[in-house]
Amino acid sequence: MIRVVAYDLGVGLDLDAAGRVLTQVEPRLVCLTSAPDPVRLRRLATSAGLEVAARCGRHDAATAVLVHPDVRVDTAASVPLRDGASTDGAGRDGSAGDEAAAVVCRVGGLRLSVTAARLPGRAEDRNVGVAALEAFLDGVDAARIVAASLDEPVGSGVLAVLTERFQDAHLVGGTGTGATRPSTDPRTRQDLVLVDRSLDVLGAFVATAVPAPLASSCLPVVADLAGRDDDATRLPVARADAARDTGDGHHPPSAPRRRPA
């Protein structure tokens, strides 16, 4: 089983609380659709027992991918999502959604493409961003996982385009509404884990237990995945009910970690 987290840390970030959230959910892969500056990002990764595999952008345009130490990273790349995006991640106006952070990695026997993308705020820029993201993913020879933050409601045109190609982990295996924003009273679902159809979605939930409501203005989405021809990864998965705050601050544990073959 491969546990993936999609997390927007752009507003109201409490770095220590975010580190505790990641420690509790025990991910193998973390996609930050809004990431802190490089120094704080390394501190966050270290506190959760993770490593920074990729980061691109600056200020509120930054995205990043973190990995567990037993994940082998083959390549890392930045994917421009807007016309005029520069190599440091700033577009013409320096707004969010300029670049996606992407890695190709090996987890156990699986070769995965993992991308963290925050799509641009303006509708016309979002359309450009989705087309650029699709073009990049078309050239990747690996099972693809995309964590995306949308600046429009679920059911929008952008999501319709993406779900023609990918499984929406929440719709396939999630419980509850999947809402992540605002973290103290979630009503909006704009943070997604999208999964290649060559992978199985074993379960998905939004982590709501303390300290998640304190860590950021958004809650993290957690998805448990497996390769369809790897029966050894088909382990029982705890569902979202166990992740809701019951007073003990616990989240469903991930499966025992295995070293890559």
Image (cartoon, grey):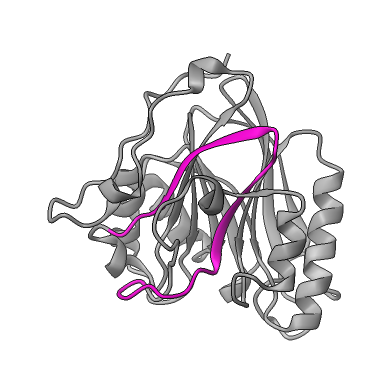
Nearest the viewer among 48 and 146 is 146
Q: Position of residue 188 (x, y in %)?
A: 47, 74
Residue sitting nearer the eye, 46 or 173:
173
Say which residue appears at 43% left-offset and 67% top-offset.
180
**Res 143 → quadrant:** top right
Report the residue that reaches farthest toward the left. 247
- Please name the residue shown 12% across and 56% down the image: 247
Identified at 70% across, 33% down, the residue is 198
Residue 117 lies within the magenta run: no
**Which quarter shows the C terminus?**
top right
Residue 198 in sight from this viewpoint: yes
Against 146, residue 60 (above or below) is below
For residue 156, above or below residue 102: below
Q: In this view, does 181 lie above or below 246?
A: below
Residue 4 coordinates in the image, percent (x, y): 50, 43
Q: Indicate left or right for 168 with 138 as reference.
A: left
User: Measured from the top left, where is residue 213 in percent x and y?
Assistant: 29, 67
Is residue 85 at least partly visible in the picture?
Answer: no
Q: Which range is magenta?
A: 183-208
Judge by depth and name the residue closer to the eye, 192 or 168: 168
Q: Position of 190 compared to 57: left or right?
A: left
Q: Quadrant of residue 237?
A: top left
Q: Residue 149's spot in the image, x, y percent? A: 59, 66
Q: Which residue is drawn at 39% across and 58% down?
A: 176
